Image (cartoon, grey):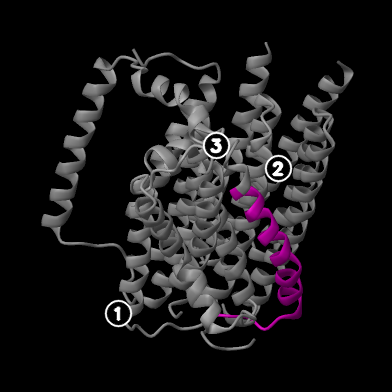
Amino acid sequence: MAFEILSIAFMFIGAIFLLAGSIGLIRLKDTYSRLHALTKADVLGFGFIVLSCILSTDLLSHWIKLLLVWLLVISYSALVGYALANRKKRYA
Amino acid sequence: MLWQTGKKDMLDLALGLMLFISALLSLHSKDTMKSGVFFIIFGFLSGLIWVRLEAPDVALVEIILGSAITGLLIFKLVKGSKQKDLKAFTFTRLWAGFISFLILIFMLFHLTTIERQDRIASLVFENLHKSGVDSAVNAVLLNFRGYDTLLEVGVITLAIFGLLSLGLKREAYYWDNPLLKGFSRLSLPFIVFFSLYITYLGTFSVGGAFQGGALLAGGLVLFALAGQALPLKASIIYIFTMAGLGVFSLIGLLYALLGYGFLTYPLELSTISIMIIELSIWISTAFLLYTAYSGKL
Amino acid sequence: MMDFVYGLLLFLLMLNLLLGLVRVFRGPELVDSMMASLLLGTGGTALLLAFFKITKEAYYINLALGFALLAGVVGVAFAIIILGKSKDGI
């Protein structure tokens, strides 16, 4: 039961961090700053959500798959952020 | 009546509203590129609606094929076209609006008068043990209505033939970056394995050959975006592309020659036949979609 | 009470997507539309994982994994195809 409450709490914290990232996306003035908001705050919020999903199940296969999702989202967030910043600086 | 409201009313309302808004923005945007992005968002929201309607197989297809792969094709299309916005003739727009309005009236009428009928669903579930797979969706797709799926694979193959025979100059976009190269090389084996897993999962849970093939096509596109060529000989790529239609129709003809009837699997061999057909659809869908993206075989 | 909590959670996560839409709509440059692809990848996968937590069906993790993979491809393709010249290295 404690795990359930902790899991829901983590998910709310994750949702709030994601919202913080999105609000940063709207209110910040420069493209590079918006990239900061997206690749840092969003990924942190996503990490909390994955943590809450891990707490809410007890199968090892689910844990491994959830960890894979987390690793994948971290790496592609960094990659896409780098690609966007680089291409924007060179071409736009 | 289909007015039964679910428990998550706020979510449903928000989903519907956002779907409508993204469709509106996609059609009325001043820039074709933005229309493409709105269309991808629209595809993802439709996938979420399928999730809410408790149809996860269709949600998987919509999110992978309808949102991501179509998005890739739209990017290449928009980049290559000279037209800057989506204007069409006024007559065309009026006509399209009128037809859409008729469809809307038709849908509303049926929504208010339809009742739940379970005849066909109960038939499927009664005969599920005879079909060789444990998932109702895949049983219908590959056994009970296998002829439909054969024709669908034929249609997508013909579409790619049409695309190739247009002979358009397709620019190759890539970025020679070690980070991207490393990431694509690390993720391609994982994507191959995961797409095969999704294809296999289709026999008893949510998944299927088309979804797996589209995932693999995404991995191949990522590999090509890093400026790398696939390490396969051209003849192997040809064989993979034609494998879906070829293997499917060969199996159908084989059973016809053996006396069972076209595409009628005998009871003991149905599971293995379905698995062979799914593998062939998997590999050929991947390479067909990759060919649609790259423009050359 | 649980339903209200879950509804609120999903609503918050959907708000992300709405804010992303606003940014794409109001963005003065093209790059801002690309931010939408990044937001959609992270926020959309988060939404699918929230569905997993609520319904506890295992296939939502597969959906989330597949979508995360393809969102990465779409984001990178956006950056390379739209914001670049063709056939060139850097």
The amino acid beneath tag 3 is Val
Residue C37 visible (yes or no): yes
Quadrant holding the C terminus of chain C: bottom right
Q: Which residues fall within the magenta stretch?
A: B173-199
Residue B158 placement, left or right of B205: left
Quadrant where the N terminus of chain C is found in the figure: top right
Q: Mark 2 points at which residue?
A: A18
Q: Does the magenta stretch include residue B171?
A: no
Circle nearer the N terminus (1, 3): 3
In the depicted structure, whether residue B73 falls above or below residue B130: below
**How far, Cα to Cα, is label 2 from label 1?**
45 Å
x, y (%) of residue C49? 68, 37
Which label was assigned to residue B166? 1
Q: Which of marks 1 and 3 is in front?
A: 3
Locate residue A38: give its quadrant.
bottom right
Q: Which chain carries label 2?
A: A
How far apart marks 3 and 2 lie (CA) works out to 41 Å
Q: Are marks 2 and 1 on the same chain?
A: no
Q: Nearer the viewer, residue B262 or A18?
A: B262
Q: Can residue B64 be seen?
A: no
Q: Residue at x 20, y 29 (%)?
A: B106
* Chain ID, mark 3: B
